[in-house]
Amino acid sequence: MNEPDYSAQGPSGGFGPEDLLACYAQGVFPMAESRDDPRVFIIEPEQRGVIPLDAFHIPTRLRRTVRGEPFEVRVDTAFEAVLDGCAAAQGPERQDTWINAPIRRLYAALFARGFVHSVECWKDERLVGGLYGVSLGGAFFGESMFSRERDASKVALVHLVARLRRGGWSLLDAQFLTDHLSQFGAVETPQAAYLARLKPALRIEVDEAALIAPMTGAEAVDWALRPD
């Protein structure tokens, strides 16, 4: 783990959006100790969590849920609200958020430039779950997810994988392997092997419109599970 202390002030000084993109291209990513800590640390884990796009698994019950479309899935319509939801989310594996003020500013700046995307689940015009991450070339770096209703974040993940596959992405980085992600086929890979996969992925030209284009639940399951 590398831990330089960055103020993340933005393009006029400190650690800004361009620096953040360079970190992802080099296989490292930012985190903070807590919501109130003003510092940003750069993390390089020895083992990296990856969700193989060509070996994604959807549990049987979740397939039925996604096909049944209990939520309206939208993309990039409420990024700030998704960020709020992720920052507020807590659970057995996360007692406090790592999304502090500098990180919020960095990702908001990258969202404005089209490098960050949010996948959102809505019910009765209420945001009930979602996720966000960074897209760079053919690599997508998943950052965080949240649910306010059962399966909302899982539905968002299935839609993300389906849209990435439809658009030509080749790498979905999950940062760390968790029990939650293991059910989808996520695996742990040494950082050196991850970097070997990252380099060619960054050179891929993808169809960004595939992320935003409408997709039914049945289409999402089909694309997420479609053989190469």
Image (cartoon, rainbow, N blue to C red):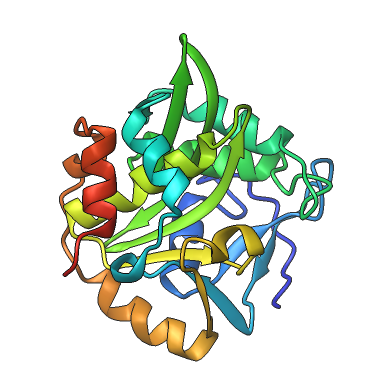
Split into 4 quadrants, where in the image is the C terminus?
Answer: bottom left
Q: Is residue 102 left or right of residue 221?
A: right
Q: Quick check: can you spot residue 163? A: no
Give the image location of residue 19, x and y in percent: 50, 60
Which residue is found at the position 49% from the left and 90% from the top?
192
Front residue of this view, candidates 65 and 145: 65
Question: Considering only vertical position in the picture, is 114 above or below 193?
Answer: above
Q: Quick check: can you spot residue 199? A: yes
Question: Considering only vertical position in the picture, is 113 above or below 137?
Answer: above
Question: Considering only vertical position in the picture, is 79 above or below 155?
Answer: above
Split into 4 quadrants, where in the image is the N terminus?
Answer: bottom right
Give the image location of residue 49, x and y in percent: 54, 72
Give the image location of residue 100, x and y in percent: 72, 42
Tell me where residue 178 sits by quadrant: bottom right
Tell me where residue 141 sits by quadrant: bottom left
Q: Is residue 177 left or right of residue 75?
A: right
